[in-house]
Image: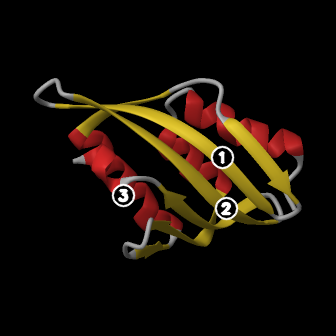
Amino acid sequence: MPTPARVAAFVAMVESGRFVEAIEAFYAEDASMQENLGRTTVGRAQMVENEKAALRRNAIVARKGSTVLVDGDHVAIRWVFEMTDDTGATRVLDEIAWQRWDGDRIAEERFYYDPGQVR
């Protein structure tokens, strides 16, 4: 079960734009991540590569002030990201991350959002 300080440190790292570093520091080596009902990515190394690819496609800024709910091993976070592509078009992604932690690492994560936001 994560401590409130550990979850707060994770949120602070993401909100500061250190997305790859957050995956490396807070996810279990064999963690899984899923976008809505899409494919599941397994393994921290693959998650890091996916995040690097996303950052090559978009400049991503996390808005400050994320809402966080912690209940034992489960954490829910409302993230709001601004994503600007190479044409200068900016989209806002408002999503909920549902996480299961194993000790001080995220073991499973699933994102819930309206896919129309990212088209």
- Which one is in front in this view, the residue at disc 3 or the one at disc 1? 1
* Amino acid of disc 1: Ile
Query: How is colour applied across the structure in the image?
Result: secondary structure
Q: Residues within 10 Å of mark 2 (few under 14, many from 20)?
A: many
- Which one is in front in this view, the residue at disc 2 or the one at disc 3? 2
Residue 85, given in percent of the width and then of the height, sits at 20, 33
* Amino acid of disc 2: Gln
Residue 79, given in percent of the width and then of the height, sits at 55, 40
**Displayed quadrant of residue 35:** bottom left
Residue at image mark 3: 49
Residue sitting at x 50%, y 58%: 112
Along the line of sight, the residue nearer the viewer: 89 or 45: 89
Looking at the picture, does residue 74 appear above or below residue 89?
Answer: below
Along the line of sight, the residue nearer the viewer: 23 or 60: 60
* Amino acid of disc 3: Glu
**Displayed quadrant of residue 68:** top right
Residue at image mark 1: 77
Q: Residue 99 has which mark?
A: 2
Sequence-earlier tag: 1 or 2: 1
Q: Please report contact status of discs 1 and 2: CB closer than 8 Å, yes or no.
A: yes
Looking at the picture, does residue 11 appear above or below residue 49?
Answer: above
Q: Quadrant of the N terminus?
A: bottom right
Mark 1–mark 2 distance (CA, rounded to whole Å): 8 Å
